[in-house]
Amino acid sequence: MNPRPTIAAYGTVDGQLVIGGMTLERLATRVGSTPFFAYDRGLLTTRVEQLRSAIPAPIHLSYAVKANPMPAVVQHLAGLVDSMDVASTGEMATVLDTVMPAGRVSFAGPGKTEAEIEMAVAAGVTIVMESVTEAERIMKTAERLGICPAVAVRVNPDFHVKGSGMRMGGGPQQFGIDVEQVPDVLARLVAAEVNVVGFHVFAGSQNLDAEVLGEAQRRTVDLILALAGRLPTPIRYVNLGGGFGIPYFERDIPLDLNAVGTNLADLMADRIVPNLPEARVVIELGRYIVGECGIYVTRVVDRKRSRGRDYLVVDGGMHHQLAASGNLGQVIRRNYPMAVGNRMNEATDGTVTVVGRLCTPLDLLGDQVELPNAGIGDLIVLFQAGAYGLTASPTAFLGHPRPAEVLV
Ligand SMILES: *Cc1c(COP(=O)(O)O)cnc(C)c1O
């Protein structure tokens, strides 16, 4: 496990983990039930400050809402980042309730229906076009409503990024328009007087290698520069994607954010500012902003021993925090960082397997984890739960109640 930096970010008092200035047991009482997710406002603020100090100031920082769409989290981040990216009209509604101006909101994601495009056009957000069909729907809707929407073309590049946890660009993809098809699509959009503001490339998620990210950004800029001449107006929007990863497992080395920042500064100075002086350049991050700022808290309801192995059965599970069970895109299951949140000053006492209450062996939160001696009533904390937690989990499975979420 690699819990040290993760746990240190929270601190402890009298053996209790502290989050948002409150000890865990007291917070559990305040919430009124377990399991629950808690997100730390102070850590979110610090995280954005760290990004701001590493990434060159002209580059805009966008929050990808799907990583954590809790309205309170989105409200808090709306005051900290420059823009937001949404992937559904539900997320769009959450963002439009904040101080974020619609002109700083982009709407990406495949399969946008005519009804969704109509809502986006009326809202005045930038529509990130993912297919030729969407191009037709956008043109039709714009004409019907008499509104000229800002449109960015999402390009599926002809390269892919090594080492991304999830690849979302390169090769055949459901995302974006293949770069070789883009010139034809642009010609049609230009002929129809669509307001094409620029391009979006998002090549992959969860990357911990600054050099690989830098290379992807460089190639993205080259690709956009090659397309720039096909627009009648200067490019006003360049979304370089993101994909910054966070450490989940023992041997994961945290991303070198300063190296990422240096690469971006070079890219701005050498390629972007001279060639695309009017472009608003955007880095779009979900996981990196929220992932390390949240925990999932679940209480032990049973302890049992089976043929030499000790089990803790908790009141939560994969239906709330699917990623920790290893069933959200992991090839080899490994344990997320975990602690007994009310026994933080106790030494580990052997290994224990932490499971949920769903009737499936997939409901495994920690496989033979070294933890202090814990029993019924103790609070198990899973770290790195701020991104792709509750909303990326099959909450309806087995019909247990939905957990609370709090921002503290
Ligand atoms: C999911 C997504 C993101 C966020 O990815 P992270 O790995 O969480 O930073 C950004 N942009 C687009 C288009 C996405 O679909």
Image (spheres, rainbow, N blue to C red):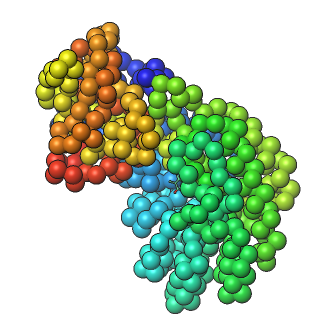
* On-image quarter of the N terminus: top left
**Residue 165, percent from left and from top:** 52, 44
Q: Specify whether 383 is left or right of 309.
A: right
**Front-lying residue, 29 or 169:** 169
| Residue at figure coordinates x 80%, y 65% from the top left | 226
* On-image quarter of the C terminus: top left
Q: Specify whether 345 is left or right of 282.
A: left
Vertical side of 119 occupied by 391: above or below: above
Vertical side of 31 occupied by 83: above or below: below
**Residue 122, percent from left and from top:** 49, 77
| Residue at figure coordinates x 32%, y 9% from the top left | 347
Residue 149 in sight in this render = yes
Vertical side of 187 occupied by 41: above or below: above
Q: Specify whether 349 is left or right of 7.
A: left
Instruction: Give the image quarter of residue 50.
Output: top right
Residue 73 in sight in this render = no
